[in-house]
Image (cartoon, helix red, strand yellow):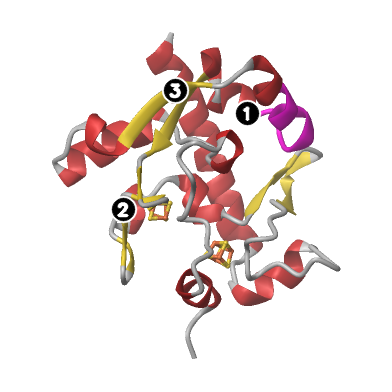
Amino acid sequence: MKNICSRCHEIGRGCCGRKAADLSEQIGIFYPEVKDIATKMNITEADFIIKDTVPDEFRLSMREAVHPIFDSIYYQNIRFKLKTVNDFCVFLSDTGCTLPNDIRPVYCRIYPFFPSKQGDKYITVLSSHECLAQNKSTNSWTIVNEHFGYSHEYLQVLFAKMNILAEMHIQYLT
Ligand code: SF4
Ligand code: SF4
């Protein structure tokens, strides 16, 4: 049986699809990740990144509603968006993401989970009606995680990596 993400993509949903024009559809990745992908895939940043800006209200709402790390992700209100082709990420192929796991953006690797604003040792679910793994009646991370089977430790390691990337991101942009 296909995994939940394959089924999600098959019916035209999935977190690798995003409309370039919709502000809220893309979180944005960290600049060290941009550099790493460009180097290891031997492509230019312009091949896969659109650098835009987000309004203060958007950054503040993400910070308040989701997590303070959005002050770093949107440092100086700059966002590094993955380019889309026909409303799907430029790295998406028929068989899934073409990026090796070690350079896949950390946001892609943790979605639909995220550190909680109550503290990084807690895990929250980024609520999305598009995500096939989510059950609208209960978005407990343990229930959603039945589809993924991640360990708490695995997500904690990725959350820690996200914090390191956030610091490096700010250094790059300062
Ligand atoms: S980088 Fe890979 S996992 Fe992330 S949105 Fe693009 S195709 Fe999906
Ligand atoms: S994480 Fe959710 S939205 Fe993304 S592909 Fe899997 S089921 Fe779909």
Asked if ligand 1 lies within 8 A of label 2, the reply is yes
Q: Nearer the viewer, residue 28 or 162?
A: 28
Between discs 2 and 1, the one toward the N terminus:
1
Residue at image point 38% right, 17% down: 172
Residue 10 as seen in the image, left or right of residue 132: left
Q: CA distance from mark 2 to mark 1?
A: 24 Å
Which stretch did the figure color magenta? Answer: 60-68
User: Where 69 falls versus 94 (above or below)?
Assistant: above
Q: SS at mark 3? A: strand
Residue 62 is situated, as x and y percent measured from the top left of the image, at 70, 31
Q: Nearer the viewer, residue 38 or 57?
A: 57
Q: Secondary structure at mark 1?
A: helix
- Residue matched to label 1: 70
User: Please, is residue 114 above or below residue 61 in the view?
Assistant: below
Q: Amino acid at mark 1?
A: Phe
Of the pair 151 and 36, the residue shown nearer to us? 36
Q: Residues within 10 Å of mark 1 (few under 14, many from 20)?
A: many
Give the Cα separation between the discs numbered 2 and 3. 19 Å
Q: Is residue 52 magenta?
A: no
Q: Which residue is mark 3?
A: 52
Quarter of image, res 35: top left
Near-viewer residue (48 or 115): 48
Q: What label sits on residue 91 in the rendered view?
A: 2
As for residue 66 lying within the magenta part, the answer is yes
Characterize the magenta stretch by its predominant secondary structure.
helix
Give amino acid for label 3: Asp
Residue 166 on image: x %, y %? 51, 28
Q: Secondary structure at mark 2?
A: loop
Chain-order first, disc 1 or disc 3: 3
